Image (cartoon, rainbow, N blue to C red):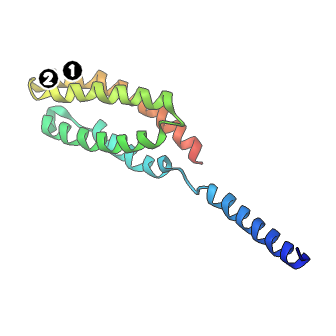
């Protein structure tokens, strides 16, 4: 084989290898781009005043948060399994409170709302912190 042909093949191989290496370096994980929207949805949910805004508003904000956090958890599960599992459990628990709130008077709903929200806040804070640190 001629030297020119070997040089061409070697150059093409190096170019292909460089291309493969660069394509393997992603610019940002999906969970990084989903974090801000999830934090915003959580802020909306956690600021719900059940006594003045009612359970319909609570339910709407929970649904919006639940949808957003599901996207974040789907992309973060592999890297943040422990935090993601804790958030899923807290979201499910809070969802039970939201579902039962419609059958309760507002005072009873607010009493259930606060501890479930604190549990959700603790778990989401841990996940949000881990994701933020990974995305910096």
Helix, strand or loop under label 2: helix
Q: Residue furthest front?
A: 1
> Callout 2: 10 Å neighbours few (<14), some, many (20+)?
few
Q: Is residue 63 above or below residue 33?
A: above
Q: Residue 31 bears which disc, if any?
A: none
Q: Position of residue 37 (x, y in %)?
A: 38, 50
Based on the displayed image, in which of its 4 quarters is residue 97 positioned? Answer: top left
Q: Quadrant of the N terminus?
A: bottom right
Q: Position of residue 119 (x, y in %)?
A: 36, 24
Q: Closest to the observer: 69 or 25?
A: 25
Q: Which residue is mark 2?
A: 107
Identify the residue at image location x=15%, y=20%: 108
Identify the residue at image location x=47%, y=52%: 33
Helix, strand or loop under label 1: helix
Q: Is residue 54 above or below residue 114?
A: below
Q: Position of residue 30 (x, y in %)?
A: 48, 50
Contact, mark 2 vs mark 1 (Cβ under 8 Å): yes
> Callout 1: 10 Å neighbours few (<14), some, many (20+)?
few
Q: Which residue is mark 1?
A: 111
Based on the displayed image, in which of its 4 quarters is residue 19 positioned? Answer: bottom right
Q: Position of residue 124 (x, y in %)?
A: 42, 33
Identify the residue at image location x=52%, y=41%: 131
Q: Image check: 90 left or right of 10?
A: left
Q: Is residue 33 above or below residue 13?
A: above
Mark 2 to mark 1 CA distance (whole Å) = 6 Å
Q: Image check: 58 left or right of 20?
A: left
């Amino acid at each position: 084989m001629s030297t020119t042909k070997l040089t061409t093949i070697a150059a093409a191989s190096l170019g292909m290898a460089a291309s493969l290496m660069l394509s393997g370096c992603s610019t940002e994980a999906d969970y990084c781009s989903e974090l801000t929207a999830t934090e915003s949805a959580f802020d909306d949910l956690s600021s719900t005043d059940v006594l003045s805004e009612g359970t319909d508003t609570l339910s709407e904000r929970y649904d919006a948060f639940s949808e957003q956090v599901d996207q974040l958890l789907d992309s973060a599960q592999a890297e943040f399994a422990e935090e993601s599992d804790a958030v899923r459990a807290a979201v499910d628990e809070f969802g039970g409170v939201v579902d039962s709130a419609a059958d309760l008077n507002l005072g009873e709903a607010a009493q259930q709302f606060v501890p479930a929200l604190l549990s959700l806040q603790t778990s989401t804070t841990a996940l949000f912190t881990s994701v933020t640190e990974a995305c910096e």
